[in-house]
Image (cartoon, helix red, strand yellow):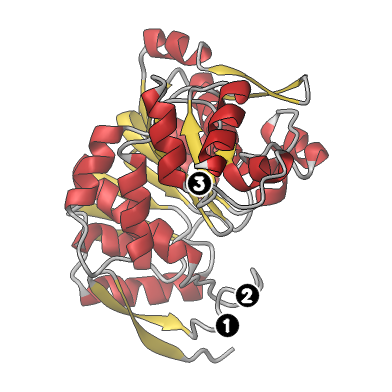
Amino acid sequence: MHLDFVPYREGKVELSVPNPEKSWQSADVPIFFNPRAARVNRDVSALILSVLQPKDVLDGMTATGIRGVRYFVESGIPQVYFNDLNKTALQLARRNAEKYHVNAQFFNDDFNLVCLRNRFWAVDLDPFGSPAPFIWSAARTVRSGGYLLVSATDTRPLSGASPKQALAKYGTILRKPEWYPELMARVLYFLVFHAAAVHGKGVEPIIAFTYEHHVRVVARLREKPSLITKNTAQIGFYEVDGKQYGPIWTGPLQNKDLAREALQRWDQDYTKVSRKILALASKEPDVLGYYNVHFWAERLRLKQIPRFDAIIDSLRERGFVAERVLWSDKGIKTDADEKTFAEVLLGAATD
């Protein structure tokens, strides 16, 4: 099948890709390429890796190779491994890598087999759909002290909208809460924790975010029994209408210092959304869930949505932490209980 490639600029590179208007609409296209949500994913990941500086990275499902090339050019990763089962995709990735003289090695194999035969300091797992079939191999192949970057696009089971699929894929019983975008990342972190623990590794969260249908988490993995023990205390449950659901990751989602460092490296070559994600991640309180202000305004039958800054100021004046969230433009994350939040919302609505 003849493929037409076009020049496409993203970040600090310009590469050949399939028609960006069509190449992301189905997993059945000859070479999959997502220029929308995945671009934000790649922007944040490149900036984060520029801070973490692993010695090498596996671009596990490489397609066009744009992710791995960007990691070499923008993140300064000295060695990039590209893998794809699709020979045509790998040929394109090779062309793109050669353009920027990437120190590269190429695998044309099943992701799980590549992970079985090798070890890497960082692994980027960005499948179409769920990472569940690949996560065990990915967690095994990451060296102690290295990094696992994982994406998922199957948002229905992750959000609790498809409980049976959530149980089958992620081993957890879910129900959709008002803060479901954050829940998706917590389920994904739970999967990473489980896979890492099976291979004797604990996890240290680096960053987590959602954008459109992409959920992304990045974690450091360490062969450290005490860290696994610490992680088990960060696995728990959440409540909806008096019933508990889970298990999920209930610990911190962000390494605020690393997010702040990555934010300092942002420039105009990156999307504004990626800057917003890093800015909010750098100050996100370590609290489970958040309040959807629009949901609560409707619940309290308010005639208009109160100003978010007024809500946040009022919560802080009462001694609570309060911040906007990266998960939703409608959310506020605070350690205030529901009764207090309702009181603050009612007060802000009358000011």
Q: Nearer the viewer, residue 204 or 77?
A: 204
The answer, for residue 55, to whether it is visible in the render is no
Where 173 falls versus 58 (above or below)?
Answer: above
Classify mark 1: helix, strand or loop: loop
Is 218 situated left or right of 31 in this image? left
Q: Which residue type does callout 3 highlight?
A: Trp
Mark 2–mark 1 distance (CA, rounded to whole Å): 6 Å
The disc at residue 25 is 2
Q: Which residue type does callout 1 highlight?
A: Lys
The answer, for residue 12, to whether it is visible in the render is yes
First of labels 3, 2 by sequence position: 2
Q: Please name which of the two marks, 3 or 2, marks the residue nearer to the observer.
A: 3
The disc at residue 22 is 1
Residue at (59% x, 88% y) in the render: 1
Q: Mark 3 points at which residue?
A: 327
- Asked whether disc 2 touches disc 1, contact meaning CB atoms under 8 Å apart, the reply is yes
Q: Please name which of the two marks, 3 or 1, marks the residue nearer to the observer.
A: 3
State the image coordinates of residue 217 (x, y, percent, origin top left).
45, 41
